[in-house]
Image (cartoon, rainbow, N blue to C red):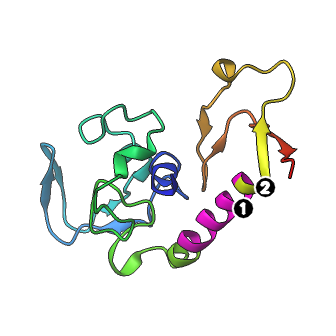
Amino acid sequence: VVKESFRLHPPAPLLVPRKAEADIEVLGYLVPKDTQVLVNVWAMGRDPNVWDNPTKFEPERFLGKEIDVKGRDYEFTPFGAGRRICPGLPLAMRTVPLMLGSLLYSFDWKLPDGVVAEDLDMEETFGITLRKTKTLHAVPVKKRA
């Protein structure tokens, strides 16, 4: 669930800018040496050439696969790769499962009255980080013991 969440909603849409070390051709385009390059991990996580049903939340796509978040698998690099990998990676990989597990264990969840799941606007707004265009509201319901 955590990997699929990071695939669809990376911490930042673009990685730290890089510089091309040599002239290189990418998908038929020449990228000259010393060109500043931005890697769009948001688009990589939604690439239909890599992912089946790329916009659908399917956590099971990672079951039985050794794909990690440390930059070894270039189709899935929500925290970047190499020496410029996000220093927050270890913290995120410990706290996100803990927080998600705690919230799911402690509460049942429902939508506000009158809101239907099919009508939710899941579009995102780009910035330094991604956020929902319209705020998503979920109502926690205390579980009975």
Q: Is residue 142 left or right of residue 125?
A: right
Label 1 is placed on what type of residue?
Answer: Ser
In this rendering, is residue 62 above or below 37? above
Query: Circle 2 sits on which residue?
Result: 106
Residue 6 position, x and y percent, is 49, 54
Q: Secondary structure at mark 2?
A: helix
Residue 141 or residue 124, whichever sits in front = 141
Farthest-out residue, front? 145
Amino acid at the residue labelled 2: Ser
Where is residue 144? Give x, y as percent.
87, 47
Residue beneath the point at 27% across and 68% down: 72
The reply, left or right, for residue 9 in relation to residue 53 is right
The residue closer to the viewer here, 142 or 80, is 142
Marks 1 and 2 sit apart, C-alpha to C-alpha, by 6 Å
Q: Residue at x 44, y 50 (%)?
A: 7
Which residue is located at x 60 percent, y 32 percent?
123
- Residue 13, image x and y in percent? 50, 52
Determine if the magenta segment contains residue 98: yes
Q: Are marks 1 and 2 in contact (CB under 8 Å)?
A: yes
In the image, the segment drawn in magenta is 92-104
Residue that badge 1 annotates: 102
| Near-viewer residue (31 or 141) | 141
Q: Left of 88 or right of it: where is 73?
A: left
